[in-house]
Image (cartoon, coloured by chain):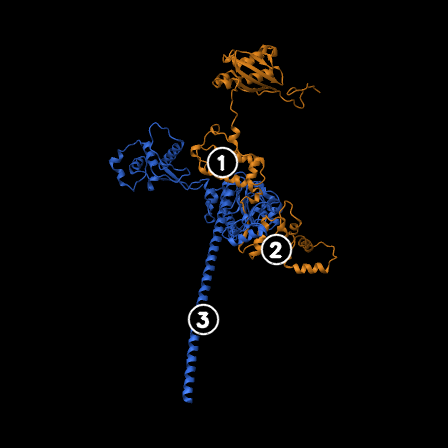
């Protein structure tokens, strides 16, 4: 269990009006360093019954937090007019916002959706986090696969427990693999075909710009790819994941080719980016992350056949040799699975960002190099022109000297 | 460009045309002219270790070999390639720009059904985003018809199973239940793409009218009988199939049933009924005429609806003969059971 603390709101800068917070403080045994005036008798005589309506109105008049609901202007309530549904909802939100500030708040507690919307990064892997997620819980000892002996910490209440440090080490290694593949522009598939895994898998794939399989793995997706995947679209991307555009000239020439001899080229439509020919063939992945290897034996076998590395969550009843990079952990707990796939998705995202950075650095370096070359060229040109000038001057000088000599010789001859 | 002349609109042709002019370097591959579900024989040869590009590079050698050993019966990959070259003419090599990658366009590529998964996940994303908005009851939602499965297939651009589209429709129904005043614009836009465009026209019904002779016409059904009735203001005459009522329906119950809508509203002597009925038996025909008379009466006087509803003559009786099942003598009757 993650230690939970309840912190009084008044220790934080309060958004409520001082009067209101003062009367709240009377109901709390919290020291109020921020306002020493709370101990004065006037405050003690303050209203014990809080006028909630007033607070709600005050909160409603404040600029509220960004909401998914379009905020229309708060119109002044004309008496007798019933509230519209939108206004009703806004008031409800406002009252929630106001009462949110009242009472204590829980710190560091488990929010299930955050594993999906904002998963931890590989750097945040701690043994506490893994323990809290139940990653160490294995299967009943009778079900174990002896290949997992090196991952197992011990037995408790009839089930095997996996060593947390081993989980952390393997998870970090797997995250590094995902990072590296993503950095080099590889194609990563996240496969999680159990109930409840869909959203985490899709979000992780979205984060890492990878691919997802959330329902049954169609046998032959790798070994018979052209038949199964051949009619789906492909794109040509550069290292910044942008489609490669065509210049106007290229498009025009394409149109001319399409039009042939007799027809008008402008009648033809051409895509703005480089398009692959239909018939390129289907794509194979470069890395497969599998959340439930037990149910996806066929997929792992196909990957092995084509030497595609795999990462898999290996519970104590799974054969650890069926994947390339095992992560010994509990594959039955949704929380643990969401944590692992979230971390791997983050790793993929970080790898992708590293690639972008490298690419921009490379572009800058090329630019710098080009500039340097231009500079060198300019200097060389300048040098040649100055040399030419010098040469010209020298020649002129020698010519004049020659003429002088000739004249002298003429004079002497005379 | 023989393949280009075969299909000048194919993207292959476009690219070939482009790549003749633009010299890209990097990965290269041979272009297949068209794509069919069954790959042409050339694609099958690609599974060999010799790639087409290598073949292309060793073109001269291959020609020389073919010239040196013309009588070898072995069908080698070179021969196959040569045949293709003879048939299609020399193939231009296709090269990708440097530092580029070929990747699937859809994140659902490896499911093999990206058409469905993409639209499904867009809807799910919307649902997750607006999950907390207040909803109305399903009964309060305005009637909407979603696109049919073939329409959805053509919209998504792929094969989608009926069971999967059922899931999509369930999500659509849920999104449609969001409080109409709070319905976000993006949800509205997405829902509109899934709505059947001609639904409003389908909903429109022919208006009920009284013709220039003062007649209101209506049809009614019961069991296997059909009836149509003309109701005109008059003095209480009633003819079915050209016969007076007591001649057509000897049983009192049937006659009462036909006149029941007029009797409960106290209008027996104000209208004349001229009806015709077909099919079924006597009681079925009587019931069908009753319904027809009720509907025609409603055309004359729509305000009578609650009264007629309470009299139980507005609803079409859905009971029909139950089908016979195998292993039974009738619909439910079991053959006699004998102890052995």
Q: Are marks 1 and 2 in contact (CB under 8 Å)?
A: no
Please tell me the colour of chain A: blue
Q: Are marks 1 and 2 on the same chain?
A: yes
Q: Is B32 in front, or is A408? A: A408
For marks 3 and 1, give the CA distance. 72 Å
Indicate left or right for A27 with A203 as reference: left
* B286 up-or-down from A210: above or below: above
Q: Is B165 in front, or is A161? A: B165
* Quadrant that contains the C terminus of chain B: top right
Residue linked to disc 1: B192
Please tell me the colour of chain B: orange
Residue B46 position, x and y percent, is: 64, 52
Q: Is A375 in front, or is A172? A: A375
Q: Earlier in the sequence, mark 1 or mark 2?
A: 2
Q: Residues within 10 Å of mark 3 (few under 14, many from 20)?
A: few
The local secondary structure at tag 3 comes to helix
Q: Is B126 in front, or is A263? A: A263
The local secondary structure at tag 1 comes to helix
Q: Chain of mark 1?
A: B
Residue A359 position, x and y percent, is: 48, 55
Tell me the quarter of the picture where residue A228 sits: top right
Q: Chain of mark 2?
A: B
In the rendering, which numbered label is found on residue A384?
3
Q: Is residue A197 visible?
A: no
Q: Are marks 3 and 1 in contact (CB under 8 Å)?
A: no
Name the residue: 46% across, 64% down. A373
In the rendering, which numbered label is found on residue A132?
none
For marks 1 and 2, give the CA distance. 46 Å
Residue linked to disc 2: B92
């Amino acid at each position: 269990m993650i230690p939970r603390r309840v912190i009084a709101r008044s220790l934080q800068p309060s958004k409520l009006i001082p009067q209101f917070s003062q009367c709240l403080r009377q109901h709390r045994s919290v020291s109020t360093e921020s306002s020493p005036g709370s101990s004065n008798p006037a405050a003690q005589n303050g209203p014990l019954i809080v006028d909630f309506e007033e607070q709600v109105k005050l909160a409603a008049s404040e600029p509220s937090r960004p909401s998914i609901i379009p905020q229309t202007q708060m119109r002044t309530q004309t008496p007798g007019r019933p509230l519209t549904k939108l206004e009703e909802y806004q008031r409800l939100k406002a009252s929630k916002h106001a009462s949110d500030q009242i009472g204590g708040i829980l710190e560091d507690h488990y929010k299930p959706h955050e594993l999906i919307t904002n998963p931890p990064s590989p750097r945040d892997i701690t043994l506490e986090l893994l323990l809290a997620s139940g990653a160490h819980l294995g299967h009943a000892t009778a079900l174990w696969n002896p290949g997992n002996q090196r991952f197992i910490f011990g037995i408790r209440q009839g089930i095997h427990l996996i060593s947390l440090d081993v989980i952390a080490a393997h998870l970090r290694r797997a995250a590094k693999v995902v990072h590296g593949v993503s950095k080099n522009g590889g194609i990563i598939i996240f496969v999680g075909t159990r109930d409840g895994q869909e959203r985490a898998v899709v979000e992780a794939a979205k984060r890492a710009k990878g691919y997802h399989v959330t329902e049954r793995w169609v046998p032959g997706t790798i070994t018979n790819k052209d038949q199964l995947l051949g009619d789906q679209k492909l794109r040509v991307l550069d290292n910044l994941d942008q489609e490669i555009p065509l210049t106007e000239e290229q498009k025009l020439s394409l149109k001319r080719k399409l039009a042939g001899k007799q027809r008008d080229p402008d009648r033809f439509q051409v895509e703005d980016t480089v398009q692959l020919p239909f018939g390129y063939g289907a794509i194979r992945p470069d890395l497969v992350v599998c959340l439930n290897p037990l149910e996806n034996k066929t997929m792992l076998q196909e990957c092995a056949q084509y030497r595609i590395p795999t990462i898999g969550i290996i519970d104590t009843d799974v054969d650890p040799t069926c994947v390339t990079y095992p992560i010994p952990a509990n594959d039955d707990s949704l929380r643990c699975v969401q944590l692992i796939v979230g971390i791997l998705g983050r790793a993929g995202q970080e790898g992708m960002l590293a690639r972008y950075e490298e690419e921009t650095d490379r572009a800058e370096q090329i630019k710098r190099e080009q500039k340097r070359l231009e500079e060198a060229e300019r200097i060389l040109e300048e040098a040649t022109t100055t040399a030419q000038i010098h040469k010209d001057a020298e020649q002129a000088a020698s010519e004049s000297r020659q003429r002088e000599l000739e004249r002298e010789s003429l004079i002497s001859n005379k | 460009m023989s393949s280009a002349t075969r299909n000048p609109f194919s993207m292959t042709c476009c690219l070939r045309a482009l790549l003749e002019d633009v010299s890209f370097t990097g990965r290269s591959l041979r272009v297949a002219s068209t794509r069919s579900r069954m790959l042409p024989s050339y694609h099958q040869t690609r599974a060999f270790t010799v790639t087409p590009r290598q073949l292309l590079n060793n073109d001269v050698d291959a020609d020389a070999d073919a010239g040196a050993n013309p009588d070898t019966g072995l069908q080698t990959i070179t021969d196959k390639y040569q045949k293709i070259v003879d048939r299609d003419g020399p193939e231009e090599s296709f090269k990708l720009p440097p530092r580029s990658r070929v990747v699937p366009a859809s994140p659902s590529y490896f499911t093999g059904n990206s058409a469905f998964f993409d639209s499904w996940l867009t809807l799910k994303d919307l649902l997750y985003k607006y999950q907390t908005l207040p909803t109305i009851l399903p009964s309060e939602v305005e009637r909407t018809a979603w696109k049919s499965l073939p329409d959805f297939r053509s919209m998504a651009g792929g094969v989608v199973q009926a069971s999967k589209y059922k899931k999509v429709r369930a999500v659509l129904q849920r999104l449609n239940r969001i409080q109409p005043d709070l319905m976000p614009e993006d949800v509205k836009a997405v829902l509109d793409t899934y709505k059947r465009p001609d639904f409003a026209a389908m909903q429109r019904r022919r208006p009920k009218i009284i013709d220039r002779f003062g007649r209101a016409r209506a049809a009614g059904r019961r069991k296997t009988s059909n009836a149509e009735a003309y109701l005109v203001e008059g003095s209480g005459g009633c003819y079915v199939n050209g016969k007076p009522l007591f001649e057509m329906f000897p049983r009192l119950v049937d006659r009462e049933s036909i006149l029941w809508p007029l009797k409960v509203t106290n209008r027996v002597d104000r209208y004349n009924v001229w009806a015709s009925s077909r099919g079924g038996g006597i009681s079925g025909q009587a019931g069908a005429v009753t319904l027809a008379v009720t509907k025609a009466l409603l055309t004359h006087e729509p305000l009578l609806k609650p009264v007629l509803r309470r009299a139980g003559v507005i609803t079409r009786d859905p009971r029909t003969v139950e089908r016979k099942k195998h292993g039974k003598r009738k619909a439910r009757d079991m053959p006699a059971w004998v102890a052995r």
